[in-house]
Amino acid sequence: MKKILTMAVFITALISQLAIADAQQCKSLVRLTDLNYAIEPGYVVAATDTTPAYCHVRGVINRAIRFQVTLPLAGWNGRFMFSTVGGFAGTIGDVTSLLSSGYAMASTDTGHEISEGDTFLNQPEALLDFGYRGVHLATQAAKRVIQTYYNDDIDFSYLSGCSNGGRAALMEVTRFPTDYDGVIAGAPLQSFSEFMPWGISIARAMQTDPLTKASLDVLAENSASACDKLDGVTDGVINDPRLCTEERLNLDALTCNGPAADNCLTAGQLETAKVIYRPLKDDAGNIVAPGVEPGAENAGDWAFWIMPNQMFGGLSPVGLQFSAVSRLMRHYPSFDIDQFDPANDVAQLKRELAPLNADDPDLSAFKANGGKLIVYQGWNDFPLRPQRAIDHLHQVEAAAGGPVDDFYRLFMVPGMTHCRGGPGAWQTDYVTSLAAWREDGIEPDRLIGTQTGTQADTVYLSPTNNRQPGKAFTRPQCVYPQLAQYDGSGDQSDAANYVCE
């Protein structure tokens, strides 16, 4: 009995000493501070039911670029995951979700705070930090912290982000191609030069004849009625919205015979809907920006982007583009946002947006470094319409002189709205697939997506949506241009009964 007690005391003392050592090692990372980085003393965060104990480090680069690094105290797998941030950034992204899988993680606000709104666009250095420098410098700092803490090299470095975070991901692939071994770019905002003028065109249509919550229901029901069954499966998801043409939608049949009502649209509202569905074209008929594909109109994504939102001071996100473009064009005395033609006046704006655009199709240096790129895009994404991602793939193929699926795979997700949500089976593990592809050569030909059927997973983050949750199901996510097709037998809710073709 005495020996057992003695051993227990020894083990307790050893654990205590290890904890003290972990805390001291974490705290001592402050010694990395130099002219390049200002790093705070790290601190240990205790384990929870979902997250292991980890060392948390905060730092600042160039007096403005905040970054954070998290390092699991035990079981580090030699991998590093950097999370890029959507919107105009200004916040720290995810630094905990993969700790339980053994990853060290990091993120950055790119050099400004979200409370600043778009005022950082007035500051040349802050603009470039947001555009590309912030993520690159934070990547270098995070790698140094990780390798110092573990006294070991990083085996594989990965990055993941969606929307503006997807744009930042493509920036790393093109401008700093050796920073990462693998990258996940969700719904990447390749070009502000395309997005901002398109946003202004939508905002102006909404100012003239605004759509309402009720009209979004009418549009959603119309799209589903016209096109849900085109793939042979009635599941609330339009598998390939490109087949859901304006002729099939027959939008004019939705016109109210009398005053505005909840089951129809006024003539003006129909024009606004057509502006959204149709591509924006210049006077020569060239497509400046693709339109929004039909489907999931009342799942919250449309409402979030086009309706007044308290998150943005009562403005809509598309309406915010008036201020952003005005700031970017402030050095042109003759520029007048009220006279700006989003279809025909893009040339000057494009020059100012060059530092922010991730539209370089030359990915050869990333490929030469062994890099692997997974891009995923929802077919029902409102702000970053799916045709943009398809066009980007074709541009990369043209630059490479042929297929690029040896290092670049695009997954088009039916029924997914912007980055997440929607009626489709959008929950997919891209991280495991990317690591297996980069490290073991296992090609991601068919991933499995899940729809839980709950309200949180069926709708987008907008407080303005009517869509009700449906049933749970799974679907394969296929490499573009393939789509999941029901094989004709078995449970239609089970991905096992679908083929990619």
Image: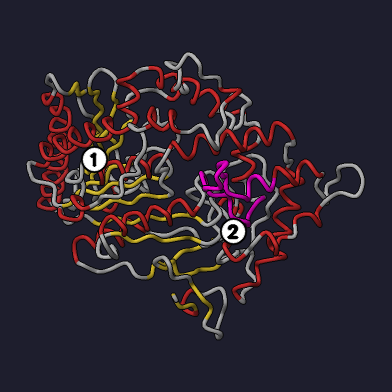
Q: Is residue 286 magenta?
A: yes
Q: Residue at x 25, y 65 (%)?
A: 406
Say what secondary structure mark 1 lies in.
helix
Question: How many angstroms separate mark 1 from mark 2 (CA)?
Answer: 36 Å
Secondary structure of the magenta portion, mostly? Answer: loop
- The label on residue 82 is none
Residues 22 and 416: in front is 416
The amino acid type of the residue labelled 1 equals Arg
Please name the residue that numbered disc 1 is placed on: 175
Precedes in sequence: disc 1 or disc 2: 1
Crowd rating for badge 2 (residues with CA inside 10 Å; few <14, some 14–19, many 20+): many
Nearer the observer: mark 1 or 2; the answer is 1
Q: Are marks 1 and 2 in contact (CB under 8 Å)?
A: no
Up-down relation of residue 399 to residue 495 (above or below): above
Say what secondary structure mark 2 lies in.
loop
Residue 444 percent location from the top left of the image: 32, 67
Please name the residue that numbered disc 2 is placed on: 423
Q: Look at the image and give the residue range highlighted in magenta.
A: 273-297
Q: How many numbered badges does the structure rendering display? A: 2
